[in-house]
Image (cartoon, helix red, strand yellow):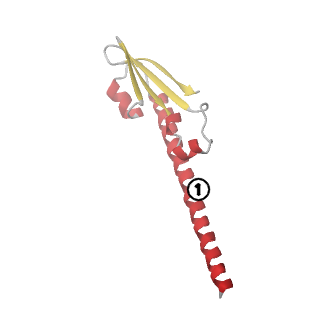
Amino acid sequence: MKRSAAKRIVKGLCVALCALLLVFGLELGRERLVYRSVSKRIESAHQQLRPGMTKSEVQNLAGDPLEMIERKPDEYWRWSAREYQGALWQRLGLSSMKGHYDLIVQFNGEDKITKIFGGVN
């Protein structure tokens, strides 16, 4: 009986470990999917932006910016896919500072695009 009880415990531990690894792998995959989705959205918006577009047009294409910097009379909006690397990727050291899509849009005092900066850093 002791041997069968030990086998059940080992089997239970193996099942629990496999389940934990599966959840871990699924979370890594989910974080990667979110990162790629945001990166593609930023890149697509960059390709569609044109000087003279309004803030609302930019927001409709790119979503809410991560950062808004006001330097009178201009204003800069910034998006970066780097900010969407998941916490698990960061804790495991799988994230990086380079190779992410960034977008910065400069607006004039009339809230219209004057310059667009974007690409992979």
Where is residue 26? Give x, y as percent: 55, 56
Q: Tell me the residue at 57%/56% (across/down).
A: 24
> As drawn, which residue projects farthest toward the right?
3
**Is 81 rendered above or below residue 114?**
below
- The kind of residue tagged 1 is Gly
> As drawn, which residue projects farthest toward the bottom?
1
The image quarter containing residue 19 is: bottom right
36 with respect to 11 (left or right): left
Q: Tell me the residue at 52%/44% (across/down).
A: 87
Residue linked to disc 1:
25
Count numbered badges in the picture. 1
Q: Tell me the residue at 45%/32% (across/down).
A: 45
> As drawn, which residue projects farthest toward the front?
2
Location of the C terminus by quadrant is: top right
Which of these two is toward me, 7 or 77?
7
120 with respect to 69 (left or right): right
Where is residue 35? Give x, y as percent: 52, 42
Where is residue 89? Give x, y as percent: 57, 44
Q: Tell me the residue at 42%/31% (across/down).
A: 66
Location of the N terminus by quadrant is: bottom right
The image quarter containing residue 90 is: top right
